[in-house]
Amino acid sequence: MKITWLGQAGLLFESDGIKIMIDPYLSDSVEAIQPHFWRRVPVDESFFEIIPDVIVLTHDHLDHTDPDTLKHYLGENTEVCVLASGNAWDKVRKAFGGIKNNYVQFNHGTEWTEKGVRFKAVYAEHSDNCAIGVLIAAQGKTYYVTGDTLYNERIFSDLPEHIDYVFLPVNGVGNNMNMTDAKRFCERIGAFAVPMHCGLFDEKDMNCFEYENKIVPEFYKEIKLI
């Protein structure tokens, strides 16, 4: 599985003929509304050439469900499976439509299989009441993308006994875990961890995340999983 960090919480999974985008944010939409959240890293427009099979939208915040980004991937003639939590689902199906796109309401507990990859929506504690994380099972590995979330006991009852990799926010603002609680979260799960949600709108250094088994990603580069 090749996994590329798109910045913020965006990820691109590529494997065996399937391309999966999760929460891509490749625009300046947030800055237009909140000027102090300006991009420290320019958009790499080469990613607009990607033709995704699946787009996962964990919640309806602009840096996760961004019409200015999604317009490059969703249209009248595209054939994309969009797995979107309730509020995001309502927004994108109205904004983009397209009779060939499949908009799946991907709420807590829902499972979906696409091209041999199994997706499951799990609980996330965030300010969007429909926010989710997602478990992705492929090639004998389990990848857990928490989405934006706080540390909450309810989450753990949704998770399988074994997770290989967890991708999680560590920025500590906007109802996300800080680095201390993210470390506790990862120790509870016991997976290799990829910290995210830093460096685009702030100057936070993810190397300061003190969880031992971490893999710090670089913008627009493949994450070298151990």
Image (tube, rainbow, N blue to C red):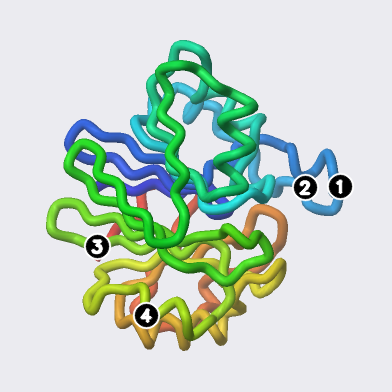
- The answer to whether the residues at label 2 and label 3 have Cβ atoms under 8 Å apart is no
Q: Nearer the viewer, residue 154 or 75?
A: 154
* Lower sequence index among marks 2 and 4: 2
Q: What element carries label 4?
A: loop
Taking the spot 59% from the left edge, 33% from the top edge, the residue there is 92
- The amino acid at mark 1 is Pro
The alpha-carbon separation of the residues under discs 1 and 4 comes to: 39 Å
Residue beneath label 2, please?
38
Numbered disc 1: secondary structure: loop
**Callout 1–callout 2 Cβ contact below 8 Å:** yes
Say above or below: 118 vs 127: above
Instruction: Identify the residue position indicated by label 3 in the image.
Output: 142
Residue at 52% in and 68% down: 124
Q: Which marked residue is nearer to the observer: mark 3 or mark 4? A: 4
First reached walking from the N terminus: tag 1 or tag 4:
1
Please give the count of numbered marks on the rendered protein.
Answer: 4
Q: What is the residue that sits farthest to the left in this orientation? A: 140
Q: Is residue 55 above or below residue 131?
A: above
Query: Which amino acid type is shown beneath numbered disc 4?
Result: Ser
Label 3 and label 4: CA atoms lie apart by 16 Å
Q: Nearer the viewer, mark 3 or mark 1?
A: 3
Q: Name the residue under label 1.
A: 35
Going by the numbered disc 2, the residue's amino acid type is Trp
User: Helix or strand or loop: what does disc 2 sit on?
Assistant: loop
Marking on residue 157: 4
On residue 208, the disc is none
Q: As displayed, is residue 210 above or below residue 131?
A: below
| Label located before the other in sequence (3 or 4) | 3
Image coords of residue 116 (percent x, y):
17, 42
Mark 3 or 1, nearer chain start: 1
- Tell me how far mark 1 sits from mark 2, CA to CA: 6 Å
The percent position of residue 177, horizontal first and vertical second, equals 59, 76
